[in-house]
Amino acid sequence: MPKIKPEMQYKPLSEKDVFEIHNTVMRVLEEVGVEVNNKKAVSLFKEAGASVAENGKTVRFSSRKVMDLIAKAPATVTLCGREEKYDVVLEPNAVFFGTGGTALYVLDPGATKRRKATIKDIHNMARLCHELENVHVFMLPLYPCDIPEENVDANRFFAGFLNTTKHVMGGVNTGCGIKEVISIAEEVAGSPEKLRERPFLSMITCVISPLKLDQHYTALLMQVARAGIPVVCPSEPLCGLTSPVTLAGNTLIQTADSLAAVILTQLVNPGTPVIFGTVASSANFRDMRYLAGPVEVGILSAAQAQMARFYNLPFYAVGGMSDSKIPDAQAGYESAMTILLNALAGANFVHDAIGLCDFALTMSYEKAVIDNEIVGMALRAARGIEVNEETLAFEAIRQAGPGGNFIIHPTTIKHMRSEHYIPKIANRDEQESWKDSGSPPLREKAKQVAEEILSASPVGKIPESKCQKLMTEYPGLVVNRGVTERY
């Protein structure tokens, strides 16, 4: 499990800052309130002791009630894989990364122009990410243009189940889709009981910044909570647009937004495995449009990681995106900055960290491979330096003596791979060797890795008999794209 030393965490907030933000969040929830546009949710809040304004929508909570309800939420949530080796335990100081977003376009290996995403791309991206060792969670990253809207939820999740045994997380669009996805997962698991014992899927709903629970997403949130499936409830406050322009103000709104949803899950089903989350960013102040890759994304996520620890909640962060249109130098440094800040902050699960560019509208196969390597380096940085008698290597130094070397010493062989991150696509050859290999740029090497994985014969992760049964029960499922076809 990737872990970070608590004493070396990046903390943009002081302890005093955290308390001040918390106290102001409580004031916002108690004095300003949250607009709740779902009558059932309003009733639940009212029954729990919240006050409801004359408009029937603005709900206000006492700080005591807020803290009591937050305490009902689990401090640790396990995102199970279908294989236990892929389990992701969201707990203090654990750091994991995954895909994410709902990108509408795809950038093929070697391409410079994007195209619309299809269901085959979700199959293929799941296959690719199953083989990338630093992708711990496959969060459904694309919205397929070739699937009827009523079949999108089932097909997106099924594409994940069919092509990876890592945990599959995704946004949902309809209540019917939630039912279908859970039913399909129960069949894959073997029974409803087995799925509840080890839920290998989780779902995402949204809070609308600032301070608004809308009718649609709130209904979905309550439905998932009733089902006992892990649920993420982030909001996306944008500095200067849907939150104050200051990073402190954005952190405040984000905290209040997500806590309102956390509270609701516990009213619906106490003990619901809920994950406090953020997708906070800032605007481009030249035209007030959304940005995906600014360094402030990493700073805000790091601050929210501190707030999550304060409330003893598992945390869903954002990082790794870029506003560049292709996997170039800008994509590299924007992604690396926010990935590294999240890792050093101890953010539990960082989504959107793999493959996203073009304001998170486009998913790139090559960038996924490159980001996998960036994540590996960030995790190594977050792990810090282990100091003990063996790693200090005094005996090895004694044996080598002044002027000696450690090239063939047993400690070098034993520790070189665990102590040092060894990249797979970065070029560390000397100039002549690089020239002899054709002077390939990094993007070309990433292209080769992606194509090698996707050109292999697909291996379905669900038995054929279950696939046939599911096809009969859900005629809208597409099971032959990216599975029986080669890349």
Image (cartoon, rainbow, N blue to C red):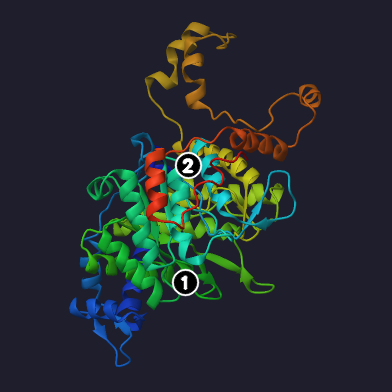
Residue corresponding to mark 2? 163
Closer to us: mark 1 or mark 2?
2
Q: Nearer the viewer, residue 282 or 425?
A: 425
The residue carrying mark 1 is 249
- Quarter assignment of residue 57: bottom left
In the image, residue 44 lies at what x, y percent?
Answer: 23, 76
| Residue 179 position within the rendered picture, expressed as x and y whole percent measured from the top left | 34, 61
- Identified at 60% across, 60% down, the residue is 104
Local SS, label 2: helix
Q: Identify the mark nearer the N-term, 1 or 2.
A: 2
Of residues 483 and 91, the one nearer the viewer is 483
- Left or right of 234: which side holds 294? right
* Labelled pair 1, 2 in contact (Cβ < 8 Å): no
Q: Amino acid at mark 2?
A: Asn
Give 214 or 322, whichever is nearer the viewer: 214
* Residue at the image position 36 percent from the left and 72 percent from the top: 218
Crowd rating for badge 1 (residues with CA inside 10 Å; few <14, some 14–19, many 20+): some
Q: Is residue 190 left or right of residue 325?
A: left
Residue at x-position 42% and y-position 49%:
168
Neighbour tally class for label 2: few under 14, some 14-19, many 20 plus, Cα within 10 Å: many
- In the rendered image, residue 96, in percent from the top left (x then y), is placed at 43, 44
Q: CA distance from mark 1 to mark 2?
A: 41 Å
Does the rendering let one see residue 213? Answer: no
Q: Residue furthest bottom?
A: 54
State the image quarter where residue 307 is shown. bottom left
- Vertical side of 457 occupied by 261: above or below: below
Q: Position of residue 266 (x, y in %)?
A: 24, 65
Q: Amino acid at mark 1?
A: Gly
